[in-house]
């Protein structure tokens, strides 16, 4: 019994790590710009594909050993994916923002960017699924009836590390302070001499970079890639971010793991087809009773 | 002044007993009592953050009081949503003008008639006889109201295109359009220049003469209060520190201390 | 005189023409179905505009309500009037299909309106982005609920609606689907128009602009929100029902977030809070989709790209928040639409 609980807890942590990593990106951008970056799930997908191409290039074409490829893959994937994110911000969001367009139009633009990423991918690489090459030898450890792999542990540890790094950046550094300042008052910030656009670009770099990392880890754990893989997981991660309290790093992290735990629990006890239904229902109930999520601060209306 | 006093009936329009409001650990209003009779023009003053607007928010039902009772025309308002309180006859204006800026001036008045529309979705969809009758009446009354407030020429304008003073006036007109027994004015002179303020004093006095309404106002411009109100209540840190006629208030030591600070620190 | 009846006249001519062309089969099946989808899209975009435009909320789950309407109307119709693998022989005489069809579609609408409560209740306490999430969640919940109902096909889908249409055409031979799509399209636009132009319905706009002021100026905001969400999702259900019968086949996958996005695109393309904009955008969007059909996958790159470019240069959509009569005041002389 205890093994079962621990086993499921580990599975939930691993599954939740992906949600948490993606949710962090949503929450960063939302916190700074109050923009729901609906393209973020697809940025994650692009990250997985970038990881795939980087990995096959080094592994197959150059014959570099697996662990070296992994060491190269992590920074390259993160850099290339963040380039994608920043490109979106530069060519699609910023012009709109500078025009002072209604916030919802930026959201729609983000949705459209997501569609473009998906279908461009589909058009270029075709509908066939890509198999991600194994980079490291997967070891299965068995401790007291609980089995886990080195990969699972790596995913969980990475998620926690990313959380700590982001938390440190947002709360302790000057950039983080500027980010928080922008989220309070976008108009006063440039007057204080803070380069608004630069900070926003950094936000996108961070968010997309970690989405890329999530893509790499996801591709390693579930080595089948397809263009629509980012859509559903992205929407779910976004909901997780909101349940945690969007705009708050801790919230995104907690929400991601919560969603992971719910889904693993559902699959453990019910037919797996009920997974989405129950997970979404639980989230809906939470949001109905706690509309701003766990860490979100309700905007008080001042009369 | 004397005449107004005589018209005062014994039945209070607003009665507040032991009103207390806590926000977390902060006690914004503490044991507040007031009784407003019909046709009175009363003032509520106090330094910034004293809890004046909170009192108004409690009366209009926007907050539910932590303790105490509010009776509008004898009816307790506990548990009522703001629109129900408004239907009882409490109208208000806001510190920062809250008009519907993308609706015409005329529509601003019309929408405020929701509590006595007398028809719902079904009638609006089939355009029944009742619907047409009520819409006609509402439109006519709204036009009349705009006319007596000299706002009719702006009927099709959007409020945001109007000068600030006119927006204030429109907000007061919108509040009066619901035929209130009690009109709460939250800093009506805020942001107005001196000639606008004179105009405002004239307007409030005229409203007070013409409509059968009790007026309770918050204002920082002392000259406005001194000129208009027959009775003023002063609060600070949620507590009543003084009340009386304008002359009493002017020379009250506690008021002077609250506003100017204590010399003997 | 002309002004009073011009809209009726134009609509009657248009409807008559389509029915005539369809009856004599001058209009190919393809063009006819494009026209019908246009009607459905008008219903969907104008009903979503009620929430996203007039009420200023951000609903991203409109296809979920469409799904409810589609399934209820399909299952009800097939159960009552068609021979089917699941339900067996029709429960009622197929002759009645003709008269029952609008009732079936309306029943789908009512079911969808009830599903709208899923969003309406949370909207009392929350709005904006948080409500947007709730609508997305509602969309997913509805889809996965239906995917799990294996009795009506689950994720494989449900079919047999052609049998109902055949039953109608056997009774009296007329192109019934175009007729009903036409009628329901007009009905939807008409209801929305009347609702938002009444003093009662202007409460919706007041909530969008300043909810606090609306509540304090005696608008029962919760009631208005409930009615608006129910009306919007109910009409989406009607659109969904018609959609199902036009295709003759439904599966939950066709009502996913992509479909919701499509509807949203039409609303923002036309302009928030402009009914004529929504109609115009629905027509243009349907045509655009059909014109780009040969591009296949590239279509879904071109359309978002066109929209992004449009957003850059005319972010308020085609009509902004104005109606046809406000943009071209001279037109007002020729028509009156209430």
Image (spheres, coloured by chain):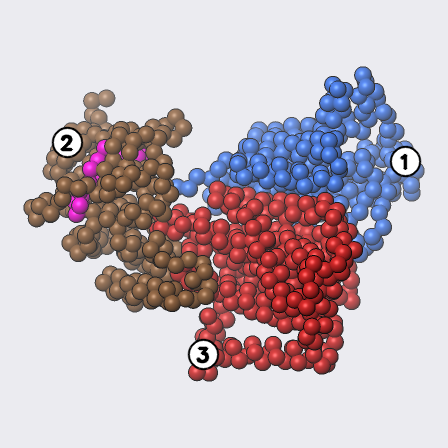
Dot 2: element: loop
**Residue at image point 87% right, 35% down:** A134
Work out whether C265 lies above or below A208.
below
**Residue at image point 58% right, 49% down:** C115
User: Considering depth in this image, is C338 or C83 the residue closer to the camera?
Assistant: C83
Q: Could you tell me residue A112's position as x and y percent?
A: 66, 55
Residue B215 covered by magenta stretch: no
Residue that protrudes farthest toward the bottom in the picture: C2
Dot 1: element: loop
Using the rendered view, name the quadrant where residue B41 is placed: top left
Find the distance from the CA under tag 2 to the CA under tag 3: 69 Å
Dot 3: element: helix
The chain letter under disc 1 is A
Relative to C226, A261 lies left or right = right
The chain coloured blue in the image: A
Residue at image mark 3: C4
Using the rendered view, name the quadrant where residue C291 is placed: bottom right
For the magenta stretch, what is the residue range? Answer: B33-52
Work out whether C313 lies above or below B38.
below
Residue at image mark 2: B252
**Residue at image point 92% right, 38% down:** A63
Find the distance from the CA under tag 2 to the CA under tag 1: 88 Å
Count of numbered badges drawn on the protein = 3
Colour that chain B carries in the picture:
brown
Q: Could you tell me residue A243's position as x and y percent?
A: 59, 36
Q: Is residue C40 visible?
A: no
Q: Which numbered dot is residue A64?
A: 1
Front tag of 2 and 3: 3
């Amino acid at each position: 019994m205890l093994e079962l609980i621990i086993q499921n807890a580990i599975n939930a942590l691993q599954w939740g790590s992906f949600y948490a990593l993606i949710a962090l990106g949503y929450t960063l951008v939302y916190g700074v710009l109050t923009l729901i970056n609906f393209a973020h799930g697809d940025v994650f997908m692009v990250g997985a594909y970038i990881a795939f191409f980087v990995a096959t290039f080094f592994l197959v074409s150059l014959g570099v050993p697996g662990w070296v490829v992994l060491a190269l893959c992590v920074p390259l994937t993160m850099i290339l994916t963040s380039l994608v994110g920043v490109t979106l911000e530069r060519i699609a969001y910023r012009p709109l923002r500078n025009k002072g367009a209604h916030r919802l139009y930026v959201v729609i633009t983000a949705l459209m960017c997501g569609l473009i990423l998906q279908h461009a991918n589909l058009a270029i690489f075709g509908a066939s699924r890509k198999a991600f090459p194994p980079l490291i030898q997967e070891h299965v450890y068995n401790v007291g009836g609980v089995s886990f792999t080195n990969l699972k542990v790596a995913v969980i540890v990475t998620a926690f590390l990313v959380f700590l790094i982001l938390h440190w950046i947002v709360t302790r550094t000057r950039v983080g302070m500027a980010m928080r300042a922008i989220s309070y008052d976008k108009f006063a910030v440039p007057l204080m001499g803070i380069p608004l656009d630069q900070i926003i670009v950094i936000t996108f770099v961070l968010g997309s970079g970690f989405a890329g990392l999530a893509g790499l880890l996801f591709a390693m754990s579930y080595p089948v890639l397809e263009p629509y893989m980012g859509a559903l997981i992205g929407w779910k991660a976004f909901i997780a971010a909101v349940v945690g309290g969007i705009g708050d790093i801790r919230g995104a992290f907690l929400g991601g793991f919560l969603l992971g735990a719910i889904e693993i629990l559902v699959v453990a006890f019910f037919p797996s087809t009920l997974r989405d239904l129950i997970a979404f229902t639980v989230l809906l109930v939470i949001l109905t009773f706690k509309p701003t999520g766990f860490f979100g601060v309700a905007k008080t209306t001042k009369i | 002044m004397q005449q107004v006093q005589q018209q005062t009936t014994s039945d209070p329009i607003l009665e507040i007993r032991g009103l207390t409001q806590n926000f977390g650990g902060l006690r914004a209003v503490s044991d507040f009592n007031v009784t407003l009779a019909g046709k009175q023009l009363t003032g509520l003053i106090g330094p910034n953050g004293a809890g004046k607007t909170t009192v108004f928010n409690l009366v209009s039902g926007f907050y539910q009081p932590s303790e105490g009772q509010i009776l509008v025309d004898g009816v307790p308002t506990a548990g009522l949503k703001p629109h129900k309180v408004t239907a009882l006859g409490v109208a208000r204006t806001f510190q920062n003008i809250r008009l519907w800026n993308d609706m015409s001036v005329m529509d601003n008045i019309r929408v405020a008639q929701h509590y006595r529309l007398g028809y719902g979705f079904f009638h609006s969809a089939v355009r029944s006889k009742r619907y047409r009758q009520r819409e006609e009446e509402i439109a006519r009354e709204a036009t009349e109201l705009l006319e007596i407030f000299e706002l009719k020429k702006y009927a099709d304008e959007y409020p945001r295109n109007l000068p600030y003073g006119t927006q204030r006036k429109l907000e007061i007109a919108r509040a009066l359009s619901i035929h209130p027994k009690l009109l709460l004015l939250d800093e009506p002179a805020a942001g107005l220049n001196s000639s606008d303020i004179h105009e405002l004093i004239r307007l409030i006095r005229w409203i007070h003469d013409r409509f059968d309404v009790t007026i309770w106002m918050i204002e920082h411009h002392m000259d406005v209060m001194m000129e208009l109100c027959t009775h003023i209540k002063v609060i600070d840190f949620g507590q009543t520190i003084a009340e009386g006629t304008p002359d009493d208030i002017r020379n009250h030591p506690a008021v002077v201390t609250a506003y100017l600070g204590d010399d003997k620190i | 005189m002309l002004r009073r009846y011009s809209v009726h006249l134009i609509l009657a001519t248009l409807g008559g023409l389509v029915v005539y062309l369809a009856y004599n089969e001058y209009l190919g099946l393809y063009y006819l179905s494009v026209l019908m989808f246009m009607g459905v899209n008008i219903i969907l975009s104008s009903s979503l505009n009620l929430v996203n435009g007039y009420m200023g909320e951000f609903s991203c789950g409109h296809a979920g309500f469409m799904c409810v309407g589609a399934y209820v109307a399909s299952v009800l119709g097939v159960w009552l009037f068609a021979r089917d693998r699941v339900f067996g022989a029709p429960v009622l005489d197929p002759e009645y299909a003709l008269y029952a069809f609008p009732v079936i579609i309306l029943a789908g609408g009512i079911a969808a309106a009830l599903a709208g409560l899923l969003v309406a209740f949370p909207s009392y306490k929350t709005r904006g982005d948080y409500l947007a999430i709730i609508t997305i969640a509602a969309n997913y919940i509805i889809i996965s609920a239906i995917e799990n109902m294996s009795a009506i096909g689950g994720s494989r889908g449900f079919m047999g609606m052609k049998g109902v249409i055949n039953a109608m055409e056997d009774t009296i031979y007329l192109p019934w689907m175009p007729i009903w799509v036409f009628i329901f399209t007009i009905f939807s636009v008409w209801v929305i128009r009347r609702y938002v132009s009444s003093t009662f319905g202007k409460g919706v706009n007041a909530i969008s602009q300043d909810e606090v002021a609306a509540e304090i100026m005696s608008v029962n905001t919760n009631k208005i929100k409930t009615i608006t969400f129910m009306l919007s999702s109910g009409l989406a259900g009607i659109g969904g029902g018609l959609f199902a019968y036009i295709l003759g086949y439904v599966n939950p996958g066709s009502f996913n977030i992509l479909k919701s996005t499509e509807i949203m695109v039409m609303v923002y393309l036309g302009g928030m809070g402009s009914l004529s904009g929504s109609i115009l955008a629905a027509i243009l969007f349907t045509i655009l989709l059909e014109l780009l059909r040969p591009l296949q996958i590239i279509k879904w790159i071109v359309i978002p790209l066109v929209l992004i470019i449009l957003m850059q240069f005319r972010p308020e959509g085609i009509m902004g928040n104005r109606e046809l009569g406000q943009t071209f005041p001279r037109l007002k002389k020729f028509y009156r639409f209430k």
